[in-house]
Image (cartoon, rainbow, N blue to C red):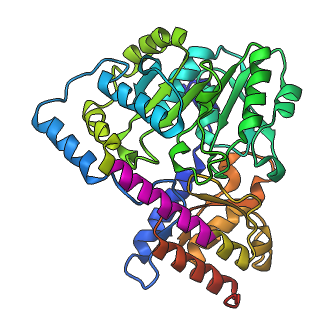
């Protein structure tokens, strides 16, 4: 059977390939004294809080399970708008918000709306792999630009200006970023958008970890800059609704009917039950619980990263958001005779029964030196992971 060139261009999602191998080994060691610990997947260990679960049950019992408008429940769009106003001090009219089947659908809709065949989209290296594949699926080309720790592993206005060509359509950013957990400094983000606007391009920004910011300097939505920025967001991370597949897209007013038309044809609508459940995310009890969880994620970061560095890993930039540690494992691996992060991840799986993500997914510039740890797991699991790494390397307990 002939496979389309579009499908052939999409590389495997190596995060999931590693996860499959880890799951297979996990079954073998499940009943030992060292079952597999998973620090590889970016999924909160918290599930939707009780008010959200109860709202879903009420929707099912009431028969509120039929199609909604393609742009989502009006009341949900209003509540998302209110969240921007109350949390970030940004006025985002509800009519510019499109509720989607997860952030993935939001990215697909944005790319199909704005990218022509051959268009190039500038992205930082490292960055989340699926984002560049959405560009490719829309017949565009993701151009990865190497970044440095001094730049917080984010693009700069100067690099965007230097990389811009006649084929460039715009930029796709993420703040906070997966895999680094770092955000773009607000002034630099404004300068990047000014470059893009002057060139007649588009600024797309993935803000799915925005609710999980730990530093007020960075915990701001790009939507505060102007109404031409396109933001992708999700109920998966801050709102702990990963499997509910619900997200949203904020677009300039002129794009709403275009995105709506595409959504009608591609998705009809996001899950109706998930939408009714998400209404409860904005209740005071739910927000209080989400803020408690945000504090817990910060506490995990504050404990785990110094432990990694004591073991010989290097975390060049302390993440200001999300729940990841982007760690250079080369010195640690050298002591064990391991050449790169791909091999390191599989050896960690076998020797320490610890699943982590190699840098291979996230780009090509220095990513063979880096692994991504997810701190979305419990403190108990993080503590046990450090002990296993220490035992594996034969290092002494740090003072």
Question: What type of secondary structure mainly makes up the magenta span?
Answer: helix
Residue at 65% across, 26% down? 225
348 w.r.t. 361: above or below: below
Q: Residue at x 60, y 28 (%)?
A: 224
Quarter of the rendering containing residue 71: top left
Give the left or right position of residue 188, taking residue 269 as reference: right
Between 68 and 321, the one nearer to me in the picture: 321
From which residue to which does the magenta span run? Answer: 286-304
Q: Quadrant of residue 156?
A: top right
Q: Quadrant of residue 115?
A: top right
Q: Residue at 74%, 58% (x, y): give it.
A: 317
Question: Which of the pair 78/176 is nearer the observer?
Answer: 78
Q: Residue 8: in sight, yes or no?
A: no
Residue 57 visible from this viewpoint: yes
How far from the left and from the top, in percent, is residue 304? 60, 71
Residue in the picture at 77% in, 29% down? 192
Q: Position of residue 196 (x, y in %)?
A: 76, 21
Q: Count every numbered label the image shows and give the total.
A: 0
Question: What x and y, as percent, mark residue 376?
Answer: 50, 60
In x, y percent, where is residue 289?
Answer: 36, 55
Q: Quadrant of the C terminus?
A: bottom right
Residue 168, above or below 210: above
Compared to 112, does 322 lie above or below? Answer: below
Residue 280 part of the magenta segment: no
Check if residue 289 falls in the magenta segment. Answer: yes
């Amino acid at each position: 059977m002939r496979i389309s060139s579009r499908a052939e261009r999409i590389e495997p999602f190596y995060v999931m390939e590693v996860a499959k191998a880890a799951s297979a080994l996990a079954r073998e060691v499940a009943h030992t004294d060292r079952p597999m610990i998973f620090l590889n997947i970016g999924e909160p260990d918290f599930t939707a809080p009780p008010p959200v679960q109860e709202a879903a049950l009420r929707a099912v019992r009431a028969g509120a399970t039929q199609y909604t408008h393609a742009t989502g429940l009006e009341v949900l769009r209003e509540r998302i708008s209110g969240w921007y106003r109350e949390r970030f001090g940004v006025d985002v009219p509800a009519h510019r918000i499109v509720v989607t089947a997860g952030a993935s659908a939001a990215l697909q809709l944005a790319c199909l709306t704005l990218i022509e065949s051959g268009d190039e989209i500038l992205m930082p290296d490292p960055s989340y792999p699926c984002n560049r594949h959405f560009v490719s699926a829309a017949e565009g080309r993701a151009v990865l630009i190497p970044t440095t720790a001094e730049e917080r592993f984010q693009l700069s206005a100067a690099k965007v200006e230097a990389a811009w060509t006649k084929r460039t359509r715009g930029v796709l950013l993420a703040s906070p970023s997966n895999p680094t957990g770092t955000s773009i400094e607000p002034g630099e983000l404004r300068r990047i958008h000014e470059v893009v606007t002057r060139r007649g391009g588009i600024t797309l920004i993935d803000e799915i970890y925005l609710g999980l910011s730990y530093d007020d300097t960075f915990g701001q939505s790009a939507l505060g800059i102007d109404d031409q920025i396109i933001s992708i967001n999700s109920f998966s991370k801050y709102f702990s609704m990963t499997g509910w597949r619900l997200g949203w897209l904020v677009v300039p007013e002129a794009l709403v009917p275009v995105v709506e038309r595409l959504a009608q044809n591609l998705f009809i609508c996001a899950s109706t039950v998930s939408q009714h459940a998400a209404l409860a995310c904005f209740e005071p009890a739910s927000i209080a619980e989400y803020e408690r969880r945000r504090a817990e994620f910060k506490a995990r970061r504050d404990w785990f990263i110094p432990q990694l560095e004591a073991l010989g890993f290097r975390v060049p930039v302390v993440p200001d958001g999300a729940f990841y540690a982007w760690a250079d494992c080369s010195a640690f691996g050298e002591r064990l005779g391991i050449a790169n992060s791909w091999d390191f991840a599989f050896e960690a799986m076998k020797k320490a029964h610890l699943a982590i993500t190699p840098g291979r997914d996230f780009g090509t510039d220095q990513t063979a030196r880096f692994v991504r740890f997810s701190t979305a797991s419990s403190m108990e699991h993080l503590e046990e992971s450090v002990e296993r790494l220490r035992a594996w390397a034969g290092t002494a307990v740090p003072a």
